[in-house]
């Protein structure tokens, strides 16, 4: 599959709202506020930005201008029902931009809605539970073979149900569906739960999917974070995993115009996500050991972390798109199941280089 390059940006805004279409007793009927984050992914044609490598900054400025009328405002003055989906559609309608792939609106750390390229709405909600587990089938001496624990996170992704558009009550529906699973999983040993004798992230995601899908036909993906930096997706057929690393690196953009500060040596703390698509190992219960992914990536990591990236051999420039292409060339032979690289220079702002199937966007 050919490479697809998307630039991704995020813009926060602070606003108040109240929703009158929710049930009478619902707390969202009261005036309240959020720290919202608008998100945008777009395919940018060459020549759109002022210079090659300046796409992320220019796209972020475009989104910031779009949401500026919402900042420190009562959203009901702009929309009759300022629910997350309606806000996302308000933002989408004001983006004078070709190549929009996704527009998202995140109202809290734990919930949001994404509009895909056909403007279909998909909501997501994040849940937490604390549990212990061990993996019984790993090799002797593997640390995951010992009983240990995690603060797990689960993100449920679902299509917006017919007849519920814009009311905001879909989150409550997800809450009701999730409640029995939380009661069983929280403060438990997962190995003791029927069907979870080998509770890998992949198997947990699959078990949750099978529990929820009959009562939640709108469910599209289940995402499980085993730690803050790695996890697995399941959509009823495919398992996918990702692992996240932090890079503290110096850069300079040689294609920036004279006088632009980005031509100077500066730096970022990058967030790098490596996404892999592989069949499930029925014995080990995972697609690939997260530790093995990090070990195989380590030579490239050492070339990137705490390094001057403008001195890398064969790198076109130091913008996130150029660096993502360099990473793909550098590691694909060692990680052939890799099919997507996310590289963010600041929160939610960077490039996505993908050559596999679509998957859900992770919260920023």
Image (cartoon, rainbow, N blue to C red):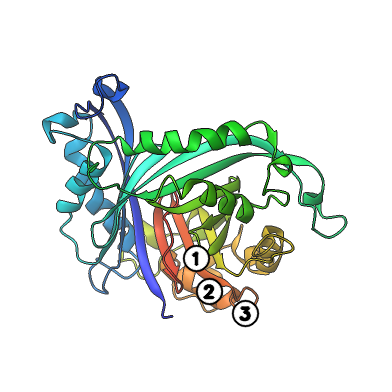
Q: In the image shown, does 69 or 100 lie closer to the viewer? A: 100
Q: Residue furthest front?
A: 214
Whether 42 is drawn above or below 61: the answer is below
- Say what secondary structure mark 2 lies in: helix
In which quadrant of the rendered image does the N terminus lie?
bottom left
Q: Which residue lies under the disc numbered 2?
A: 328
List x then y, in percent, for residue 128.
Answer: 55, 36
- Say what secondary structure mark 3 lies in: loop
Q: What is the distance, in whole Å, between disc 1 and disc 3 at their CAs?
A: 15 Å
- Identity of the residue drawn at 61% across and 59% down: 305
- Identity of the residue drawn at 22% across and 53% down: 62
Q: Earlier in the sequence, mark 1 or mark 3?
A: 3
Q: Are marks 2 and 1 in contact (CB under 8 Å)?
A: yes
Q: In the image shown, does 350 or 175 lie closer to the viewer? A: 175
Marker disc for residue 177: none
- Identity of the residue drawn at 25% across and 48% down: 162
Q: On the picture, is 97 further left or further right than 332? A: left
- Say what secondary structure mark 1 lies in: strand
Q: Which residue lies under the disc numbered 3?
A: 333
Whether 35 is drawn above or below 159: the answer is above
Q: On the picture, is 31 further left or further right than 210? A: left
Marker disc for residue 341: 1
Q: Is residue 305 visible?
A: yes
Whether 187 is drawn above or below 54: the answer is above
List x then y, in percent, for residue 344.
Answer: 45, 56
Q: Earlier in the sequence, mark 2 or mark 1?
A: 2
């Amino acid at each position: 599959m050919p490479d697809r390059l998307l630039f991704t940006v995020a813009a926060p805004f602070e606003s108040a709202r109240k929703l009158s279409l929710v049930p009478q007793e619902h707390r969202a009927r009261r005036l309240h506020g959020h720290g919202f984050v608008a998100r945008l992914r777009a395919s940018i044609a060459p020549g759109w930005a002022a210079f090659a490598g300046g796409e992320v900054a220019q796209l972020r400025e475009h989104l910031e201008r779009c949401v500026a009328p919402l900042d420190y405002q009562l959203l009901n003055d702009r929309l009759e029902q300022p629910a997350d989906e309606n806000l996302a559609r308000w933002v989408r309608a004001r983006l004078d931009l070709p190549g929009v792939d996704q527009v998202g609106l995140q109202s809290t750390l734990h919930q949001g809605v994404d509009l895909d390229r056909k403007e279909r709405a998909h909501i997501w909600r994040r849940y937490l539970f604390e549990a212990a587990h061990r993996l019984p089938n790993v090799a002797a001496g593997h640390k995951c073979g010992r009983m240990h624990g995690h603060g797990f996170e689960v993100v449920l992704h679902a299509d917006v149900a017919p007849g519920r558009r814009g009311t905001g009550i879909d989150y409550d529906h997800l809450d009701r569906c999730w409640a029995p699973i939380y009661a069983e999983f929280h403060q438990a040993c997962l190995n003791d739960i029927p069907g979870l004798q080998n509770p890998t992230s992949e198997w947990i995601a699959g078990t949750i999917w099978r529990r929820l899908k009959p009562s939640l036909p709108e469910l599209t993906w289940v995402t499980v974070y085993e730690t803050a930096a790695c996890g697995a997706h399941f959509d009823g057929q495919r398992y996918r995993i990702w692992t996240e690393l932090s890079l503290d690196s110096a850069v300079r953009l040689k294609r920036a115009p004279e006088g632009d500060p980005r031509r100077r040596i500066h730096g970022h703390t990058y967030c790098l996500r490596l996404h892999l698509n592989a069949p499930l190992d029925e014995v080990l219960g995972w697609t690939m050991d997260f530790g093995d992914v990090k070990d195989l990536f380590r030579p490239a990591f050492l070339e990137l972390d705490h390094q001057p990236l403008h001195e890398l051999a064969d790198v076109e420039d130091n913008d996130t798109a150029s660096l993502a292409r360099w990473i793909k060339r550098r590691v694909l032979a060692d990680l052939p199941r890799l099919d997507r690289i996310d590289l963010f220079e600041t929160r939610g702002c960077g490039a996505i280089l993908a050559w596999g199937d679509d998957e859900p966007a992770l919260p920023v």
